[in-house]
Image (spheres, grey):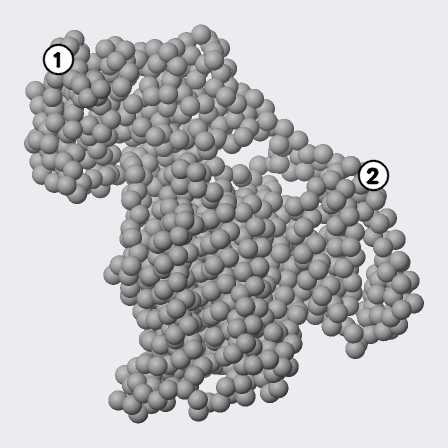
């Protein structure tokens, strides 16, 4: 069975700094793969290359059999890759529901003039968009429901913004979800909930998921497979237990600092 | 050849004036990322302040002090008035908007510009005034280089500008405050965390930029004569063009841009027609921006994802 | 950090936010309540305003349009001309709002598209070529080419972000005026062909004419414009809540995130630019027909700033907002044209500002009483030692005559003193914003007095200057007090 996403010998350097080095990676259908590694290991750069923000220096990124290297981010999103951002980039001045509705842009067709004239087709489409957005938001239980639909996103709490970002990402109708530190900044209870939620995303919605995460409880709780990066190099791959106990991973996290002190 | 030299000289004079004015735009942009459209008005008030000093001290025909002292006092007076307006503008129009959206200070700047222009109209009425410099300094005094004669006032402008630029460069690179200015324009938050007094730096920036605008105003009036309430708009636009061509935010860029725009204007007037002067200058700007979006000496900003 | 951009009213994260809050009612709830309380109007007009808010947008538009339709019956013919000017401004503001308010693109070339449409129409519908294209043919062609020009400018600037876009488009505006002013004829074409008329512009432009129905009176212009604006509002309202409108607003908030959420941002920006340009070009044709001519001076930066002011003042991003902005910005100068009305407005504005800004009532009374006493005291002293100070003639109008016995009306020969008073009044007004408590009162009293002195002696006689002065001050104050505009929503931005 072909993997959903396959990355082959990916390389990227900024100036003289090699950020990603000969990276191979694959995500199968409905698999959850976690990427761990210390700060500056190249994790977010990897996401940026998959989603088309950066073009790799060499190597290939293959989504469901087709190379997506060189495509614009919105085209890649259309191909079924959706992401969230480490730094939280919800559309702050739009309402919660609108945030999710925007993400259906690529899947809808009404031209501007059709919308302006409110043709039957545009109206039908608009109804569908709203309905789909409500469904996506309902996935999070009561968290983003009811009156919150019409609240501006800036009024949401930090944890709810993270949830909203995920809801928005799922609204692009993706095959593969890239989650960049979904549990960052959350308290233990929220982290626990996020862990369950990621599991549900796979089981109930059938997404393949690639996660960057620092919280080892989350990584342990969700991952089918874990990949450790350090300075752009893959230093370990396998089950959580294998990777977490691998000496080179421990060294990457603790080694240099501890050794120098 | 003689004609060419003459035009070059014109361009150099004009360019000096623009460069001094452009530095103010660039410095403020560098620090606040604000297009200070009211900068031209500061320049206009500088020119009027110089005129005020001149009139108070007996006028061009019968000054009560020696000419050299008169000139110094005129420059000093214009610098005081200009920098006062500049600092007040920052304190009352821009500081309250420091953390608001990008467009608010821009609109505020336009408001300040309108207000200052109307104030000038109120205070000085709509007519033209002139420094009548030839009465102060005989047009025949100066230096003769080959076939052309350079009037002393032009020498003064060109040399004066060069001195100011060297001093400014030294100040920015060597002095404590100058380094702080550079630090703030590079990254305001980081500079603040490192203990730089950002408010102080911003005030100093406005002070210096406005003082330079004042100098530029007096220089313009000395060489080209006429001053009027609308002069800041046109000159401000040209200097703004210069700042953008050179790379807005960059002080050497502003100097280079000013000279370039001055030259372009002089050659256009000399060889083509003054009708196309603005068109060529603005076209030059668009060309530069399309080829190098950040201007000649500007640096691209990194955007973190 | 995103948290630092929280508005102050956002509460700290609730500790129970997590697994233990089964009801799902967490920290955000009170935001909803505070949002509702924003709608809580006070005062006599509150029921009417609340009722207006509860109406469907369609009904609100219908009521507003009907009210606007009565205008020609209520005002003098000259008033209709002013109303036409306001409608033209409103139409431009609606167009600019698409580009700036929704897509967030700082398009300073907007006025050039307006000029392009106006000149295009003037050239093809006058003795200039001569050509007299039928209106129904000229309009679609002009709208198309205005939009196409918008696309071109947008393509040229697509690599530029933020301020550089603003700068480049600004110079596009400047160049446009330079071209129409200086290129009377195209290069390499017959000498006799005078395209733009240079500084003199193009006079004698045809009125709109649809198959014999000529739109050539003020009233006809007014109603045609009103109908067009209503249609435009409906179209834009529909658009704003469609996928395209949402995508524009998303781009304004965060370009990168929008692109990751399947939005082709370059095309959308192009579309916004083109839509704005097309609306501007279309408005230009009306403008040329209404004014029966086009002149380079109509399309300068001053007018660009006027359009921007309307959008910003009313509330960028909000359709009712920009309409209100156009109404205020379009009508205010007319109001200030007559010294009597301007005076009324000045004193009314002054009083309202004082009542709103000075909080304890006794302090307000102290300021008002203080000004009155201060005025009489100054007058008494001046009358005794400086007779020139009261020999002037007061301006026309009820208020000015009333104040004649109180404020100094300087004689012609000493009127120059008002320059000092002017500077002192500005300095005082600025100082008021800095000092606190009773010091404020102490500064306010002479400041207000000097302001009135300057007004009665000079400004009342110089309406155009006053207009510019107040306009400038208005923009600055507006930005400091309410940057989102009268009807705009407060925005949160991450920098």
Residue B302 location (% of width, % of height) = 29, 44
Query: Where is residue C141 drawn, in percent x and y?
Result: 37, 65
Residue position for label 2: C362
Whole-percent x and y of residue C10? 52, 26
Q: Secondary structure at mark 2?
A: helix
Mark 2 and mark 1, same subunit?
no
Which quadrant, please, contains the N terminus of chain B?
bottom left
Q: In this rendered view, identify the residue nearer to me: B275 or C283.
A: B275
The answer to whether residue C461 of the structure is visible from this angle is yes
Image mark 1: chain: A
Q: Residue at x 58, y 64 (%)?
A: B81
What residue did someone put label 1 on?
A246
Q: Quadrant of the C terminus of chain B?
A: top left
Q: Indicate the position of residue B117 as horizontal and vertical percent values.
A: 58, 66
Query: Image check: C93 left or right of C179?
Result: right
Q: Is residue C220 visible?
A: no
Q: CA distance from mark 2 to mark 1?
A: 77 Å
Residue at left offset 71%, top offset 66%: C420
Which is nearer the eye, C138 or B34? B34
Q: Residues within 10 Å of mark 1 (few under 14, many from 20)?
A: some
Q: Could you tell me which chain the residue with mark 2 belongs to?
A: C
Q: Is residue B5 above or below residue B215?
A: below
Q: Residue at x 44, y 55 (%)?
A: B28
Secondary element type, mark 1? loop
Is disc 2 surrounded by few (<14), some (14 to 19) or many (20+) residues within 10 Å? few
Q: Where, by quadrant of the figure, is residue A179 drawn?
A: top left
């Amino acid at each position: 069975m072909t993997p959903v996403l396959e990355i082959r010998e990916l390389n990227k350097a900024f100036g003289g700094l090699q950020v990603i080095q000969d990276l191979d990676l694959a995500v199968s259908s409905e698999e959850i793969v976690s990427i761990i590694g210390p700060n500056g290991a190249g994790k977010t750069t990897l996401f940026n290359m998959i989603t088309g923000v950066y073009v790799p220096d060499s190597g290939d990124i293959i989504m469901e059999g087709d190379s997506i290297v060189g495509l614009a981010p919105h085209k890649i999103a259309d191909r079924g890759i959706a992401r969230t951002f480490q730094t939280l980039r919800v559309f702050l001045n739009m309402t919660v529901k609108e945030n999710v509705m925007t993400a259906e842009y690529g899947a809808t067709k009404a031209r501007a003039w059709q919308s302006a004239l409110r043709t039957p087709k545009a109206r039908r489409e608009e109804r569908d968009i709203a309905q789909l957005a409500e469904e996506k938001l309902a996935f999070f239980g009561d968290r983003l429901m009811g009156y919150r639909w019409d609240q501006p996103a800036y009024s949401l709490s930090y944890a709810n913004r993270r949830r909203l970002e995920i809801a928005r990402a799922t609204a692009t109708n993706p095959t593969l979800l890239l989650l960049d530190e979904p549990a960052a900044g959350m308290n233990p209870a929220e982290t626990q909930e996020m862990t369950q939620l990621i599991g549900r995303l796979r089981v109930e919605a059938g997404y393949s998921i690639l996660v960057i995460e620092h919280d080892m409880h989350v990584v342990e709780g969700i991952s089918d497979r874990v990949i450790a990066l350090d300075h752009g190099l893959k230093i370990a791959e396998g089950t959580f237990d294998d990777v977490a106990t691998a000496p080179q991973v421990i060294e990457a996290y603790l080694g240099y600092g501890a050794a120098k002190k | 050849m003689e004609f060419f030299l003459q035009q070059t000289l014109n361009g150099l004079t004009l360019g000096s004036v623009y460069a001094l004015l452009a530095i103010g735009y660039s410095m403020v942009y560098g620090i606040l990322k604000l297009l200070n459209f009211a900068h031209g008005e500061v320049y206009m008030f500088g020119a009027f302040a110089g005129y005020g000093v001149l009139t108070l001290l007996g006028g061009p025909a019968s000054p009560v002090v020696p000419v050299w002292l008169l000139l110094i006092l005129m420059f000093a007076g214009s610098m005081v008035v200009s920098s006062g307006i500049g600092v007040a503008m920052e304190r009352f129009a821009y500081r309250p908007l420091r953390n608001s959206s990008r467009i608010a200070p821009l609109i505020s700047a336009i408001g300040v510009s309108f207000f200052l222009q109307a104030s000038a109209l109120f205070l000085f009425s709509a007519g033209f005034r002139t420094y009548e410099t030839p009465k102060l300094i005989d047009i025949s005094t100066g230096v003769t280089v080959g076939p052309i004669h350079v009037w002393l006032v032009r020498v003064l402008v060109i040399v004066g500008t060069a001195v100011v630029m060297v001093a400014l460069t030294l100040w920015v690179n060597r002095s404590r405050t100058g380094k702080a200015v550079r630090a703030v324009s590079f990254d305001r938050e980081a500079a603040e965390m490192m203990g730089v007094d950002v408010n102080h730096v911003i005030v100093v920036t406005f002070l210096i930029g406005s003082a330079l605008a004042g100098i530029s105003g007096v220089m313009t009036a000395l060489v080209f004569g006429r001053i009027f309430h609308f002069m800041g708009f046109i000159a401000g636009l040209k200097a703004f063009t210069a700042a953008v061509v050179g790379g807005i935010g960059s002080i050497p860029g502003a100097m280079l841009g000013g000279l370039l725009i001055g030259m372009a204007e002089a050659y256009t007037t000399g060889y083509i027609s003054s009708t196309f002067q603005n068109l060529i200058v603005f076209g030059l700007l668009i060309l530069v921006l399309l080829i190098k979006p950040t201007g000649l000496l500007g640096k691209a900003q990194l955007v973190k994802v | 950090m995103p948290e630092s951009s929280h508005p102050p009213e956002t509460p700290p994260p609730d500790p129970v936010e997590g697994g233990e809050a089964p009801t799902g009612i967490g920290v955000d709830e009170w935001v909803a309540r505070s949002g509702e309380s924003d709608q809580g109007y006070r005062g006599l007009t509150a029921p009417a305003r609340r009722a207006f808010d509860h109406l469907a947008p369609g009904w609100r538009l219908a009521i507003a349009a009907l009210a606007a339709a009565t205008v020609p019956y209520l005002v003098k013919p000259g008033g209709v001309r002013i109303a036409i000017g306001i409608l033209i401004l409103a139409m431009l503001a609606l167009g600019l709002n698409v580009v700036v308010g929704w897509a967030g693109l700082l398009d300073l070339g907007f006025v050039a598209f307006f000029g392009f449409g106006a000149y295009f129409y003037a050239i093809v519908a006058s003795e200039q070529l001569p050509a007299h294209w039928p209106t129904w043919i000229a309009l679609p062609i002009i709208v198309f080419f205005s939009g196409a020009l918008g696309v071109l400018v947008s393509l040229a600037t697509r690599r530029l972000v933020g301020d550089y876009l603003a700068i480049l488009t600004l110079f596009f505006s400047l160049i446009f005026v330079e071209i129409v002013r200086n290129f009377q004829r195209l290069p390499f074409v017959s000498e006799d062909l005078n395209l733009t008329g240079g500084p003199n512009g193009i006079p004698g432009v045809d009125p709109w004419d649809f198959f014999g129905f000529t739109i050539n009176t003020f009233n006809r212009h007014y109603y045609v414009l009103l109908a067009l604006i209503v249609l435009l509002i409906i179209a834009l309202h529909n658009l704003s809540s469609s996928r395209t409108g949402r995508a524009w607003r998303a781009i304004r908030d965060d370009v990168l995130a929008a692109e990751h959420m399947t939005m082709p941002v370059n095309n959308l920006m192009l579309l916004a630019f083109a839509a704005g340009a097309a609306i501007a070009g279309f408005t230009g044709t009306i403008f040329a027909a209404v004014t029966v001519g086009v002149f380079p001076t109509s399309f300068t930066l001053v007018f660009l700033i006027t359009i921007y002011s309307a959008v910003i003042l009313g509330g960028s991003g909000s359709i009712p907002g920009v309409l209100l902005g156009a109404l205020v910005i379009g009508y205010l100068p007319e109001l200030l044209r007559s010294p009597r009305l301007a005076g009324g407005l000045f004193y009314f504005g002054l009083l309202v500002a004082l009542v709103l800004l000075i909080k304890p009532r006794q302090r307000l009374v102290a300021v008002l009483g203080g000004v009155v006493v201060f005025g009489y005291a100054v007058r008494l002293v001046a009358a005794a030692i400086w007779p020139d100070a009261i020999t002037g003639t007061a301006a026309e109008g009820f208020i000015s005559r009333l104040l004649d016995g109180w404020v100094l009306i300087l004689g012609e020969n000493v009127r120059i003193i008002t320059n000092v008073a002017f500077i002192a009044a500005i300095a005082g007004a600025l100082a008021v914003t800095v000092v606190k408590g009773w010091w404020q009162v102490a500064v306010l009293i002479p400041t207000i007095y000097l302001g009135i002195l300057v007004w009665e002696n000079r400004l009342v006689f110089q309406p155009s200057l006053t207009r510019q002065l107040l306009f400038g001050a208005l923009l600055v104050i507006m930005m400091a007090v309410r940057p989102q505009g009268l009807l705009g929503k407060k925005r949160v931005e991450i920098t």
